[in-house]
Image: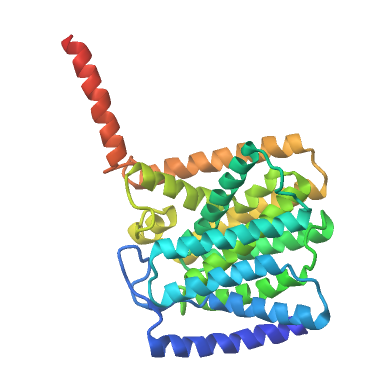
Amino acid sequence: MIYLVLFLLLIALMNVYFWLGRKYGIVAHVNERSSHKKPVITGAGIIFVVSYLFYLLYAVVVGIEVNWLISISALMIALVSFFDDIKEIWFFFRLCFQVVAVLLLMWQLKLDFSISFLGLKMLDWIAFSFLLILFVGAVNLYNFIDGINGLIGGLSLVFFISVIFLDVYVVDFIKNIEKIYFLIVPTLVFLIYNFRKKPVCFCGDVGSIFLGMIVVYLLSLLIIRTDNFTYILMFSIIIIEAGYTVIQRLLMGQNIFKPHRIHLFQLLCNQYGHSHLKVTSIYVFIQTILALFVVLANYYEMSLSWQYSIGGTVFFIISLLYVLYKRELQGGHLLEDGKPIRKLRKMVYKKESTKKHI
């Protein structure tokens, strides 16, 4: 009953936000990165933050234990991201807040598993620094997939449903599973308005960064609790789409923080005119199959060696198909205008010509 009330309340709040968005011009304007042709209200991902605040209130009233550090972390970075949706904030300023937020996330993991940072050796601090960079990167990868209608909502829904099944039937790793339901409800509400041919709203950084923090925390919690890295497959579509595109742009000598249109889903929707809903459905379907494999493999207690073998093979095949298909869509190349690559070629050619001359 409480979730039905929450659903109806969030529907009403969304409509109030639409009115405010139109009145104060909180819209995503059409630019060189856009997959839409008209300005659309953005920042509607604030609905996830509002629902999470309702969860915190509910937890305090009912007496449920709350993980306050990750809650403060996610809410803090969501607030900064919402201001960025309204008026662009200097990237370095946002990055500083993201680093602080991820440090709080890591401290929450420390408390959850009673990990001691005192007395750590230099190698451990190097690993800690690497994880800090990895987590910040993962949160931003989640932000990068907010590009076409329904994608971020669909992938989040698959993740949250998988997490519930794993917690109930496989391994108890979430202290209070109610928080997941308070995230599923706003996801459904958001999809009602976003998973359309002509979306009413976009998630914005406020929603995608907030979801990224929560997802990265839950995934880390699950992996540390089980010592099973196969669960990364639940994040794999985001790694392949956003992660590989970041690597591609770095090799092309591009600024990865500036707008672009070379995600595979952007190529499919913008250059080749495929339906947003069709492309999103394919992405969500693939992620559902991968999540289903992980869930069933652990439910039926498949050995880790088999999980790593099958999971690694599947991930490699999907990655290879992704790269080859994207290369084909981009005219048989992935690094056109790649300055680093051109410089490397010049160096190689220069050395070869010198050898021939000698």
Q: Is residue 358 left or right of residue 136?
A: left
Q: What coloring was used for the rendering?
A: rainbow
- Give the number of marks: 0
- Res 198 seen here: no
Front residue of 80/301: it is 80
Which residue: 71% across, 78% down? Answer: 55
Position of the C terminus, as image quadrant, is: top left
Front residue of 211/163: it is 211
Front residue of 238/289: it is 238
Which residue: 53% across, 50% down? Answer: 133
**What is the quadrant of residue 5 in the picture?**
bottom right
Q: Is residue 75 above or below residue 234?
A: below
- Farthest left residue in view: 357
**What is the quadrant of residue 91 in the picture?**
bottom left
Q: Is residue 196 left or right of residue 32?
A: right
Q: Position of residue 286 (x, y in %)?
A: 59, 53
Q: Is residue 110 left or right of residue 64?
A: left
Position of the N terminus, as image quadrant, is: bottom right
Which residue: 60% across, 75% down? Answer: 48
Q: Is residue 308 above or below residue 298?
A: above
Which residue: 60% across, 76% down? Answer: 49
Q: Position of residue 173 (x, y in %)?
A: 79, 57
- Farthest front residue in view: 119
Q: Position of residue 288 (x, y in %)?
A: 64, 56
Front residue of 304/279: it is 304
- Res 50 seen here: yes
Q: Is residue 88 above or below residue 168?
A: below
